[in-house]
Amino acid sequence: MSQKGFLIGELSHKMRISTQTIRYYERLGLLNEPERNTAHYRIYSEEAEQRLQFIQKAKHFGLSLEEIKSLIEIRAKGVAPCANLKAMVEKHLNDLEQRIQEMLAFRQELSERYEQIETIIPDSSAVATEICQGKICGIIERDNKNKTKNSTDY
């Protein structure tokens, strides 16, 4: 630590994050703009180090940088942001639960498709030429499940 604070490289090393990440957080407003020394190098305070620690811990709650910034801004107004944190984490849990259910449904559907393929081609060395006829792959082209569903929906 320099006399007044940390140079960006020192802070980066101490926090185990890149200097680019620190600058990015500054641009997003997650960190206050640091003071500069006479050589115009950034000098970060212990407050900046504590803010980076908070950001790293907040990310473990599944929060986006935008959400973290929101919590910081709420606290800057003198209000404890814990109720906001609760709502954010609850939303993430609900979203995650929905994605898990969608993935489980997709897994079931994919398993059923695999079973159909397995009955058509029981041995991977066997080529069912009649079934596989098509422009590219007859098995896919003949699939009637979810005709209108886009594969990126999963």
Image (cartoon, rainbow, N blue to C red):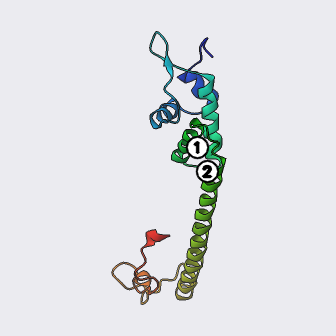
Q: Is residue 13 visible?
A: no
| 138 with respect to 76 (left or right) | left
Dots 1 and 2: beta carbons under 8 Å?
yes
Amino acid type for the residue under numbered disc 1:
Leu
x%, y% of residue 83? 65, 51
Residue that appears at 61% across and 50% down: 84
Q: Identify the residue at the far bottom of this view.
A: 130
Counting residues from the N terminus, which is met first, the one under dot 1 or under dot 2? 1
- How many numbered markers are drawn? 2
Amino acid type for the residue under numbered disc 2:
Asn
Name which quarter of the figure residue 92 lies in. bottom right
Residue that appears at 44% across and 72% down: 151
In the rendered view, tell whether residue 21 sits above or below residue 71. above
Residue that appears at 44% across and 88% down: 131
- Residue 71 is labelled as 1
x%, y% of residue 54? 64, 37
| 83 with respect to 114 (left or right) | right
User: Which residue matches tag 2?
Assistant: 84
Q: Is residue 85 visible?
A: yes
**Where the N terminus falls, by quadrant?**
top right
Helix, strand or loop at label 2? It is helix
Name which quarter of the figure residue 17 lies in. top right
Name which quarter of the figure residue 148 lies in. bottom left
x%, y% of residue 35? 50, 19
**Closer to us: 92 or 9:** 92
Please rate how many residues cluster around mark 2, counting C-alpha atoms within 10 Å: few if below 14, some from 14 to 19, many from 20.
some
| 53 with respect to 29 (left or right) | right
